[in-house]
Amino acid sequence: MRVFLTGGTGYIGSRLIPILLGRGHWVRALVRPGSESRLPAGCEPAIGNALESASLARHVRAGDTVVQLVGVAHPGPSKAALFRSVDLASAKASVDAARTAAAAHFVYVSVAQPAPVMKEYVAARAEAEAYLRESALPATVLRPWYVLGPGHRWPYAILPLTALLKRLPKTRETALRLDFVTLRQMLDALARAVETPHDGHRVVTAQEIRAGI
C-alpha cells in the first residue's frame, strides 16, 4: 500500500515506518526542511508544514492511506493551548488534505474518552475525531490512553492499582477504557489499521488494541 504519514520522526512514527517498509508498503513521511535525515532509511521524505492543509495536499495521492501521528510530546496540563494549536490543527489539516486528494483511508491516533483527567487534551482529540467523521473519509481511529515503552515507563509503578480497579464493579468500565497499552501493541494495531482499511468510521479502543483486534 501507499502510505502518507505525518509525525514520522516522533515516538511512534519513527518506529512504525520500518515496520510498514518491512511489510512491503511504500511510505512517504512529512518532515520539516532539514529533518529529512531523521526519517528511517527507505522512507521517502515529503517537505512541508503539518499545520497547513495546502502544504500536505501537495504530497497526498488519490488512494493513499494517510496516518496522522502529529501531536505535542509528553502532553500535560501546562500544554493545554498547544493541544488546539498543534494536535487539533494538524489533524484538521491532514483530514482536509486527505479529502482533497481522495485518499482511500485515514488512520488517526486519538485518546481514550471520556476521561476524568487531561480534559483539554481529550477535548482537542475528540474535536478532531468529529471533524474526521464529518469529512466522510473511510477512517480508523485508535483510542489508547497511555503507551508504555522506552522513556514511558512510570505507569508500571501503578499497574497493581489499575489491576485492582479493573476488578471492582464501580471502576471496571473506566479502568478498562483507560488501560495502558504497550508500544508493541500500539504498533501492531497501527499496522493492522493500515492493512485492513475500513469502509466507514471505525473506533478501536484500548481494550481492542491490547487484545489485537
Image: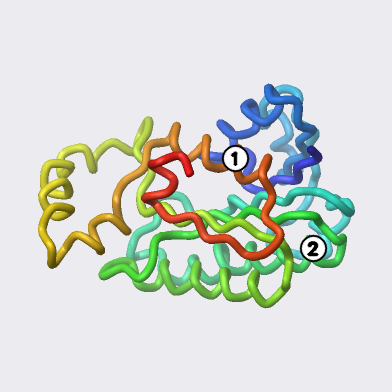
Residue depicted at x 85% and y 66%: 100
Q: Where is residue 132 in the image (x, y as percent from the top left)?
A: 65, 69
Left or right: residue 58 compared with residue 175: right
Residue depicted at x 75% and y 49%: 65
User: In the structure shown, which secondary structural element does the residue marked by tag 2 occupy?
Assistant: helix
Q: Where is residue 142 in the image (x, y as percent from the top left)?
A: 51, 54
Quarter residue 165 falls in: bottom left
Left or right: residue 40 compared with residue 148: right
Q: Look at label 2 and name its amino acid.
A: Ala
Quarter residue 85 falls in: bottom right
Quarter residue 202 falls in: bottom right
For the N terminus, the quadrant is top right
- CA neighbours of label 2 inside 10 A, class few (<14), some (14 to 19), many (20+): many
Q: Which mark is residue 97?
A: 2
Q: Label 1, on which residue?
A: 192
Residue depicted at x 45% and y 56%: 143
- CA neighbours of label 1 inside 10 A, class few (<14), some (14 to 19), many (20+): few
Residue 38 seen in the figure: no
Residue depicted at x 67% and y 27%: 40
Residue 129 seen in the figure: yes
Labels 2, 1: front one: 1
User: In the structure shown, which secondary structural element does the residue marked by tag 1 occupy?
Assistant: helix
| Rendered view: 134 above or below 54 | below
Q: Nearer the viewer, residue 144 or 205?
A: 205
Q: Nearer the viewer, residue 120 or 22?
A: 22
